[in-house]
Amino acid sequence: MTSTDIPDGFEPLFRKSPLTEPWEPLYSRKTDKAVIIGLRLAKPHTNGRGLIHGGLIAALADNAMGYSCAQATGWTTSFVTVSLTVDFVGSAEIGQWCSIESDVIRTGKTICFAQCLAKADDTVIARASGTFRVVPKKG
């Protein structure tokens, strides 16, 4: 795989936000149980030392877990983050493929719990967990 290849099954991310716009292109792949977010790491994703910024990982972990909770509930509700915890266990560099792979632990009427792993070329660089409050969609 070259530094520009996108792994099979990934398509442009289906939802855009002003926060993630500078990080484009972002990709996603839906499985039966989760929404995986992926991107080819580039200079706009780095900190002052040239490594991937932890804030990028935290934001994308938050998104992937929130989307996965929404998918687990049939996209019938929205979610807002109540708690987000990230443990950084490695680093990543420009050119690597970064994927945020989440797992919904439990959904309820008011709360959803999820966790995820951030990987750079299949090596775990962070793990995160999140608690999300169910917000009924309007109209």
Image: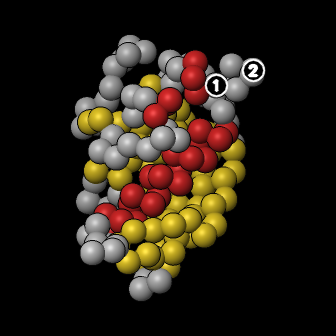
Question: Residue at horizontal 67%, vertical 39%?
Answer: 54
The colour scheme used to paint the residues is secondary structure
Location of mark 1 (residue): 46
Establish if 70 lies above or below 7: below
**Alpha-carbon span between mark 2 and mark 1:** 7 Å
Establish if 108 lies above or below 130: below
Q: Among all residues in the image, which is located at the extreme right?
A: 49
Image location of residue 77, percent across then percent down: 35, 72
Contact? badges 2 and 1 (CB < 8 Å): yes
Residue 27 image-quadrant placement: top left
Residue 121 seen in the figure: no
Residue 106, label in figure: none
Residue 39 image-quadrant placement: top left
**Secondary element at image label 1:** loop
In the rendered view of the protein, which quadrant contains the C terminus? Answer: bottom left
Q: Amino acid at mark 1?
A: Thr
Q: Amino acid at mark 2?
A: Arg
Q: Among all residues in the image, which is located at the extreme bottom?
A: 109
Residue 49, label in figure: 2
Question: Residue at horizontal 29%, vertical 44%?
Answer: 14
Establish if 64 lies above or below 98: below
Q: Label 1 neighbourhood size at 10 Å, few (<14), some (14-19), many (20+)?
A: some
On screen, residue 122 versus residue 33, left or right, reads right
In the rendered view of the protein, which quadrant contains the N terminus? Answer: top left
Question: Residue at horizontal 26%, vertical 60%?
Answer: 32
